[in-house]
Structures are given as C-alpha cells and as structure tokens.
Image (tube, helix red, strand yellow):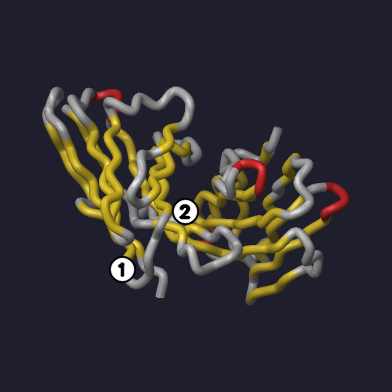
Amino acid sequence: AQKVTQAQTEISVVEKEDVTLDCVYETRDTTYYLFWYKQPPSGELVFLIRRNSFDEQNEISGRYSWNFQKSTSSFNFTITASQVVDSAVYFCAPTFRVQGGKLIFGQGTELSVKP
Amino acid sequence: GAVVSQHPSWVICKSGTSVKIECRSLDFQATTMFWYRQFPKQSLMLMATSNEGSKATYEQGVEKDKFLINHASLTLSTLTVTSAHPEDSSFYICSARDHTLSYNEQFFGPGTRLTVL
C-alpha cells in the first residue's frame, strides 16, 4: 500500500535556527512525484516543490532545501535560518501512479518559529 | 497562471439546510478536480474526484448522497453539502489538475470554511 509518514507532529524553534522536516513514504511504484506544501494560518495551501522520482538531485531555493533519497524513500525539507513567517503546517504529499495520481497527504508538521 | 478560486470563502448555515461551494479554474481547463475536507489540526482528506462530464468518484466512507458533486464544465465543479449538520463543519478545499501537464500537479483553491449551527 502507498503510505506517507511525517513523524514530527510539532516542531518549535527559535528564529535563525535551522530546522528539518522529515517525510518518509512507502511505494512499489518506480515512477512517482513528490510535493511539499505550506499551509499558513489562513488555510490556503502554498506549493513549495515538486520532485520526479527519477531526479535525485537535491534542490535549494533560497532558505529552503530538499534532500531526496530514493534508496530510503525519504524526501526531507530543511529551512535554513528560520523566520517567524515560516510558522505554518507543512505537508509532504506524494502521488503514485497505482493510485491514479491522487495526492497522498502526510499528517503534517506544525512548525512554530519563535522570535 | 494556474489559479483556482473558491466561493464562498466562508459560510455559516443552520442545521438542515444545503450549502453549495463552487470551485473554478480561472486560467486553465481542468478535466479533473478534487474535493478535500480538513478538520482542525488534521491533514487534508480526499473526499472525491470530480471528472468533467461524468459522475464523481467518492472515497470510502464519504456519503455521495450527502456530498453532491457536479463538474459540468472544464472550469467549474460544485460541491453541495445537503442537509448539513454541525459535524459537517469543516474546511473544504478544492484542487484542479491541468490536463496538459504530465506531472499530476494539482492547483489548490483558497478553501471554504463551513460552520453549521
């Protein structure tokens, strides 16, 4: 069965700290896509990144970086020098072909960045 | 590009009434739209997949007679919560898939907060 786990329910850091949000998934699919979304208190989902399962290069976008390890089925997200505006719930959401491309949302990690 | 709107953004209704939520893709055609429900402090749960011109496919445990979905055009899907009850109070989010893209990306609406009194 296809499954995604975000083991960290809540994380609290102080501004300027680095923080890593974990995402582990299970699948027998060889072709799939992985997404991360941010949900601020307003509720609207904000797209952060899409990654193809064939592309294992790590990606950096400003203070955000992603580490994709296909061998361990993990797609972790790191925020460097966190800011108060990073406070939100973050969802990891893969899509698998065997499930018709539906997004499978993890439980979410609530990040609180304190000044 | 790839903007999805939802209307209304919030609604309060009395128990027993029906509420309709609209989801529109503004700058692309969406053959497939999805409806999610999110309770406080929980993840998004897929309710149904809406395909233009055909019946929606509901996830297990979702009552199709209670949550009516209509996807009559390539840019509009509606979710009607019939005979709403307080337990239906939730955050409803739609998303739309651009069928011209190969990577299954869904574009999300801003959500509709439903409160049933």
Label 2 with label 1: CB-CB less than 8 Å: no
Label 2 or label 1, whichever lies nearer to me, is: 1
Quadrant for the C terminus of chain B in the image:
top left
- The chain under label 1 reads B
Left or right of B23 in this view: A2: right
Q: Position of residue A60 (x, y in %)?
A: 70, 73
Q: Position of residue B35 (x, y in %)?
A: 39, 44
Q: Which one is nearer the viewer's eye here, B42 or A86? A: B42
Question: Does the image show residue A41?
Answer: no
Left or right of A70 in this view: A96: left
Q: Which residue is mark 1?
A: B26
Mark drawn on residue A89: none
Q: How many marks?
A: 2
Q: Amino acid at mark 2?
A: Gln
Up the image or down, B55 lies above or below B33; here it is: above
- Res. B4 image quadrant: bottom left
Q: Amino acid at mark 1?
A: Leu
Up the image or down, B56 lies above or below B28; here it is: above
- Res. A34 image quadrant: bottom right
Measured Cα–Cα span from mark 2 to mark 1: 21 Å
Q: At 50% across and 68% down in the image, what residue appears? A: B100
Mark drawn on residue A39: 2
Q: At 38% across and 39% down in the image, what residue appears? A: B56
Q: Which one is nearer the viewer's eye here, B20 or B77? A: B77
